[in-house]
Amino acid sequence: MTNTLFQLGPFKISFLNILLVIGIYVAAFILKKVVMQMARGYLKSKEITLGSRQTTWFNLIGQSFYIGALYFSVMSFKFNNPEITFKDFLNYKLIDNDGFKLDFYRILVLISVFYSAKILVNILRLIIVQRLKKRKNYSLATEFVYVQLSKYIIYLFAIIIWFKTLGIDLTILLTGSAALLVGLGLGLQDVFKDIISGIVLLFEGNIRVGDIVEINGNGSSSKNPGEHMVVKILKINIRTTEIETREGNILFIPNTRLTQDIIENWSHGSEKSRFKIEVTVNYGVNTEKIIYLLQSAALSHPHVNKNEQIIVRLAKFGDNGLEFELLFWADQSWDINNYRSEIRLEINRLFQENNIEIPYPKRSIEVLNK
């Protein structure tokens, strides 16, 4: 039980030490569960509801049990290492080479910086949300922009502190790797373009989380000219944007698609847009009746704006018949294709009731006997 299995820094670790560490963490887990359940039970009995900020602090207090377990785990090593103090453990050098230094103290600092950054991000998120919700023009998209920018800035400072803690001189590092950075810049120029585009999207706010946009693939970044799709913006990251298609597929596209392609944002400006349905009928029909039926089909739909004029116009004399266009105003909805389909079904029903045929191409084949 007390025979040395391996050495951890200045401590000689035995099987007994391993059992003690496991026991300490199991005890911390059980103690955390009991204390948190008692606290929740007390709050429930008093009908006290925690806000978002109080919930965050409540969870942080729960994590402190594991921090205490780490300290007691290290102290448990003194059972068979009585001459070594906790300070000796922290100052034990793991690596000390040309300015790069690593010991348990620095590892502890790195871990502390990481968790401090996460805590600071959560606290800033709470502060930002509370401040923004007081504004009349509050939106989830604005909240997302501020939270993302705050997160990137905090983690950037955390990385700088990491380098400083490890004794790495950033100036020398950047100077010495200048040629490498140039090579990386040339090889990863598309990645850097996407990152710059992500920063532009976050700062400009022309496209926000929750917006419904139509991406026309006619820009310089499109690999399929003429391709377009209507999508919902789910999340804007530093390099890519997460979108949802009408089919329910989740896609990740480079940010340059949103800054260099032609984008029609359905969520900006007016809440309503004009949409078009094309219909072809046989030559010789009563055009006034066709206009009346098409207008009736549009007016019957609950999502068509009745306050705007519904226009039916004869677009052209086609090869197969008279080609009409039905123009109507409706909400810039994610389900506009469903609305169009429902109006087309109503048009088909009205045409059948009035014995109006929709023409289609016909082929005549003549067989010549020789």
Image (cartoon, rainbow, N blue to C red):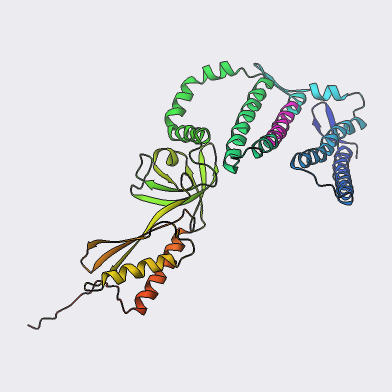
Q: Is residue 137 left or right of residue 44?
A: left
Residue 19 in the image, given as x and y percentages of width and height:
87, 42
Q: Residue at position x 74%, y 29% from top?
A: 112
Residue numbers of the magenta segment: 109-124
Q: Residue furthest bottom?
A: 369
**Which residue is at the front of the view, 25 or 210?**
210
Residue 199 in the image, given as x and y percentages of width and height:
51, 33
How many numbered circles are shown? 0
Residue 260 is a magenta residue: no
Residue 260 in the image, given as x and y percentages of width and height:
40, 38
Residue 131 vertical placement versus 336 (above, below)? above
Q: Magenta part mainly helix, strand or loop?
A: helix
Q: Residue at position x 77%, y 26% from top?
A: 104
Q: Residue at position x 35%, y 48% from top?
A: 224
Q: Quadrant of the N terminus?
A: top right
Residue 340 vertical placement versus 167 (above, below)? below
Q: Residue furthest left?
A: 370
Q: Quadrant of the C terminus?
A: bottom left
Residue 111 is a magenta residue: yes
